[in-house]
Image (tube, rainbow, N blue to C red):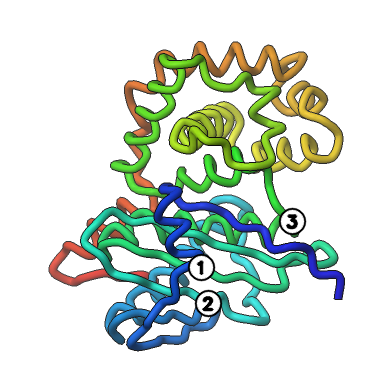
Amino acid sequence: MGLRPRTRRGGRRAMAALALAILPMMAGASARSTNFTVEAPSTEVARQVASYAEHYRRVVARQWIGEELPDWPRPCAVRIKITGGEAGGVTSFGFARGKVVDQEMSLEGRIDRILASALPHEVTHTIFAAYFGGPLPRWADEGASLLSEDRRERLRHERFASDLLTRSGGWRLPDLFSIEEYPSDLMGFYGQGYSVSRFLVEMGGRPRFLAFLRDGMAGGWDAATKAHYGFSNAKELDRAWRSWHSVASHDLPRDDSHGDRLVVRAQSPEGADTR
């Protein structure tokens, strides 16, 4: 059926992603929602993850593409491993004829960090995959998905970006835009991808960012930069981003992410309302 090789999107930690990809999961319970089937150590965790995943799928789609996605013909399989550490995740996709034909997700960590950070990140990957019908450049897929995470993680990736620029100057944007595989400096790459994505979204909004990605992949990044952001080429965009980052990296926009809002709601006496 013309299935493309599976495209795997990494989580925030390479080791966690590797472990999730190669170690079998011994799930103890499962839950099914309209678009997700979740295997987890307990029924409570499985139901909670399924509910939050549906919520993120609705709100992230509305935020990025202006409307909710239609229900998937096949639910996305989600496997949960609860540990005492921070959360990490990985989602893989199969594409054919410009559509997602298969997708699966694995997450591990503390349940609070999964719900606030790793789960919205990975669900954002599924929104992008459905919208574009194929893989995005890795810097954009990971960087823009980080915008869905809670403030704690976004601040952490601001530090990764700043550390990268101090250490090596990072990747020039013409080079960053062309990276096809994850580099060895994974945290620096995630940090810069996040910072550049934030810069472009704050400068022109999310619809323009998506249009920039589509045109950049199809016709080149210089032409897309000029058409959507008014700079003559990606080199000029690089200079503008670096100037912006030197100021903006010290703070974040005041508006909360989806993860922030759900964590607050979960801690309220009424509990999590994921409608």
Figure quadrant of the N terminus: bottom right
User: Which amino acid type is shown beneath numbered disc 3?
Assistant: Gly
The crowd level at tag 2 (other Cα within 10 Å; few <14, some 14-19, many 20+) is some
Q: Nearer the viewer, residue 106 or 234?
A: 106
Residue at the spot 30% in from the left edge and 51% down from the top edge:
260
Q: Position of residue 222 (x, y in %)?
A: 79, 22
Would residue 29 be seen by someone viewing this image from the given angle?
A: yes
Seen in the image, is 188 located left or right of residue 239?
Answer: left
Q: Nearer the viewer, residue 220 or 254?
A: 220
Seen in the image, is 255 located left or right of residue 196?
Answer: left
- Of marks 1 and 3, which one's residue comes earlier in the chain? 1
Q: Position of residue 14 (x, y in %)?
A: 45, 48
User: Which amino acid type is shown beneath numbered disc 2?
Assistant: Ala
Residue 16's quadrant in the figure?
Answer: bottom left
The crowd level at tag 1 (other Cα within 10 Å; few <14, some 14-19, many 20+) is many
Would residue 206 be seen by someone viewing this image from the given angle?
A: no
Q: Position of residue 26 (x, y in %)?
A: 37, 82
User: Which amino acid type is shown beneath numbered disc 1?
Assistant: Met
The residue labelled by disc 1 is 105
Figure quadrant of the C terminus: bottom left
Q: Nearer the viewer, residue 110 or 230?
A: 110
Residue lying farthest to the left in this orientation: 269
